[in-house]
Amino acid sequence: MVILLTILLAFQKYTSKDKEPFPEVKFIAGSSITANLTDFDPNILNQEQWQKLGFSEKQITTILKYKDIVGGSFTSKEQLKKCYAISEEKFEELKPFILLPEASENSNSKHFNSFEKKEITISGKFNPDMKTSPDWIKMGFSERQAEAIIKYKNYLGGSFISKEKFKECFIISPENYSKLEPYLLLPAKTPENFKAAGAYYPEKKKVQYHSFDPNRLDNEGWKTLGFSDKQAQIIVNYRDKNLHGSFKNMDDLQKCFVISAEKFQEMKAFVKFNPETIKKEGMQQEKTDFSKTDLNAITFKQLIEFGLDEKSAGSMIGFRKKLRGFVNKQQILDTYNIDKELVQKLISIAPLDASTVPKYTLADAPEDWLKDHPYFKYSADKIIFYRTTYPDDKKILKFLKLKPEYEQRMKLYLR
């Protein structure tokens, strides 16, 4: 019996080879790693760090390909949850520690409105291979969804191949697929010899290093070392603004947060400082230890020092001022007009002390506080009216008839 099962499993593995673009995912039951987890940003994890979270090499490959398809970074927990390689049980285990918004930000939303689903409209039969991003948007998909659909098509080699493959596009919900399926001009089944085109996700080229002085490199110079446009700009800004024009030593270079530990180890043997390019300073400025800097006390200047631009730093400080302090780190990620990548890095390092944030009951909250606080001001007049007759928070909340997410935000600042 055991021999028969072994043969069947081997046959199944052989016959399923090359039929799917993503590796088969198998989850092995084991002891929970929750006790060893700390807050983390899935956008900055490397292969080894994903392994420490309990994922296999095949699962990590799938996660990283999924990340590429959705635009190069995960924008929400909701989006990460859709990844094939992460089981529902595993996601629930990791969810409390993930430094991402619950749902993707809707740039047109105001006053914390929830995302409003658009109805998909179809005018007639069509070949999805011919649709552009604006075409998908016109059909009713969001801009991000349209981009992800195009990226998925590119991953498959420039064609959706079949209805079967089109259905696997994780951006398209089962409900929307049911509406689209009768109109798709595609074969029902995937050809036996189909294999996803790996050319759309090429391996990163290995950098050919040579001796260099980090104080002489401009943006283009850093890009030749394998950094992106944005990373190169951040490194140059960090050197010129935060370090007053030059890296003084290897420690300065290593502390630049866009240079990963792996990247630093790769290039450190080629770093050659020329004393002539190191600018002398009369007094060495003391650098901020962000691991000991409270996010409710961090200053505009310190945020700039960390690498945020003035717009991001101003938005974060302004939102914190309106709230009278952050209660949790998720609120910081929900701030509008911030560089989420850098802020995620910051909040993974810096602590948050919410012990001095003012909290009230709805019955005794000052009127000016209610009318100015972002979470209360749109209900302030109703609160003030109801509490004259019902000085009880539970009853007032019941009368307000708020959406659950609005009520949860209010409760962060209620005693």
Image (tube, helix red, strand yellow):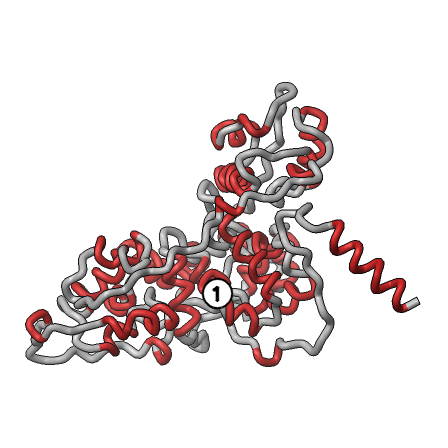
**Observer able to see residue 312:** no
Q: In the rendered image, which quarter contains the C terminus?
A: bottom right
Q: Of residues 368 and 329, which is closer to you in this image?
A: 329
Task: Answer with left or right where residue 322 lies relative to residue 185.
Answer: left
Residue at the spot 37% in from the left edge and 75% down from the top edge: 294
Residue 282 appears at what percent x and percent y? 6, 79
**Observer able to see residue 347:** yes
Q: Quadrant of residue 187?
A: top right
Residue 27 appears at what percent x and percent y? 70, 65
Task: Answer with left or right where residue 217 lies relative to residue 94.
Answer: left
Task: Answer with left or right where residue 207 lies relative to residue 96.
Answer: left
Looking at the picture, which amino acid does disc 1 mark? Asp
Q: Of residues 65 and 389, which is closer to you in this image?
A: 65
As displayed, is residue 376 above or below residue 262? above
Residue at the spot 20% in from the left edge and 77% down from the top edge: 249
Residue 26 appears at what percent x and percent y? 71, 62
Q: Which residue is mark 1?
A: 41
Q: Of residues 327 and 236, which is closer to you in this image?
A: 236
